[in-house]
Amino acid sequence: MAGTSGGEFTPADGLIGPPWGAILHVQRADAAPCAAGEVGQVWIESPALVRGYLGQDELTRQAIQGGRFATGDLGLLDERGWLHLRGRERDEINKGGLKISPAEVDAAAEGCRRVADVCAFAVDDPLYGQNVGLAVALTEPDDAAVREVYGWIRERLAEGKLPARWWLVDAIPRSEPGKVSREAVREASTSRGCTRASRRRTARSSRRSRVFTGPTPWAAAACDFPSRSWAPTSPRFRGC
C-alpha cells in the first residue's frame, strides 16, 4: 500500500514511502488523527478493502472500523505524507502509561559499533506494570563494550525509555527470513534471573557464570542462555 518509487529520496530507518492506491491514516488510541511526525496506529482506507475475516466476526470488528483496516503497525506520516514504520502495536511497551516502541530502542542501540545484534521487549515491572528489557549481542563482550553501549544509548533515548533490564547474549535467535520474535527472546531471557555484582557466586550459578569487574555503570552476571544478564544499580533503578 506504500513504498518508495525509485525517485530521489534519502534512505532512513523505517522509511516506507508515499501511499499507493490507498489512503493511509495514523491515529491515536482514541481515533484522533496524529500530527505529522507523531507515532500512532496505522490504518488503511482503500476501495479494495476486504469485507472481513470469514467466520471471525469479532476479529473483523476489531480490524475493520469505519471503512478502515487496522494494520497492527505503529508508524508516522512525515510532512510529505510518507509513511515511516516504528514497529508492531502488539510489541509496544506500556511503562506506567508511557508507550515505548521496542523498535525505537533497537534503533538507538544498533548504531553503536560494539553492538552485533539487539532485541528490546517488555518485561514485567511491579511499579510500572511493564518496563524495557534488552537482549544484546556484543562484538566483544567486555567491560569497555558494556560501558560504551550504555553511554551510546543514554545519548539517544529519553530517560524513561532506557532499558531497565539487560541480557548479554551470544546471538539473537532469528527465523529463516531473518525476523526476530520478541516474545521468544523475552521468554528465553526472563527465564533467567539477574544477579547483582555485589553477590558472590552461589551453588546455583552456572559454571559459565562470572561477574563483570571494573567501573561498569551496572552489575552483570552470567547465565547459560542468555549468556549473561544484568540490571542497572544506579539509584534511578531498582535492583533485581
Image (spheres, grey):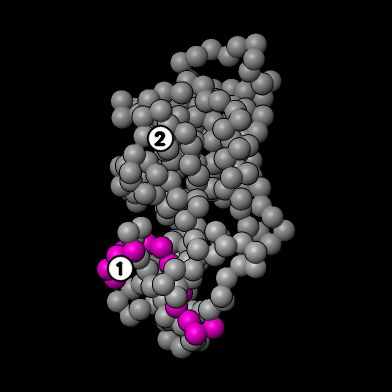
- Whether residue 112 sits left or right of residue 184 in the image: it is left
Which residue of the protein is positioned furthest toward the left in this rendering? 35
Q: Position of residue 138 (x, y in %)?
A: 56, 44
Q: Residue at x 40, y 35 (%)?
A: 129
In the displayed structure, 37 sits above or below 222; it is: below
Q: Is residue 234 above or below residue 157?
A: above
Check disc 1 and give the amino acid type. Pro
Q: Residue at x 33, y 80 (%)?
A: 80
Determine the secondary structure under disc 1: loop
- Is 239 on the left or on the right of 119, as rendered? left
Residue 6 lies, in percent from the top left, at 50, 86
Badge 1: residue crowd in 10 Å (few <14, some 14–19, many ≥20) = some
Q: Amino acid at mark 2?
A: Gly
Q: Residues within 10 Å of mark 2 (few under 14, many from 20)?
A: some
In reply to whether residue 173 is colored magenta, the answer given is: no
Q: Main secondary structure of the magenta part?
A: loop
Towards the viewer: 122 or 57: 57
Tell which circle, 1 or 2, labels the residue nearer the N-terminal end: 1
> What secondary structure is found at the residue carrying circle 2?
strand
**Can you say whether 192 is above or below 138 in the image?**
above
Label placed on residue 33: 1
Left or right side of 171 for 67: left
Q: Do the numbered discs 1 and 2 sit on residues whose CB atoms are within 8 Å?
A: no
Question: In the image, is residue 32 part of the stretch drawn in magenta?
Answer: yes
Q: Which residue is mark 2?
A: 129
Q: Which span is picked out in magenta?
A: 31-48
Q: Nearer the viewer, residue 61 or 205?
A: 61
Between 168 and 101, the one lying in front of the other is 101
Residue at the image position 50 percent from the left and 14 percent from the top:
199
Q: Is residue 189 left or right of residue 150?
A: right
Q: Quadrant of residue 131?
A: top left
> Residue placed at 42% from the left, 86% from the top?
8
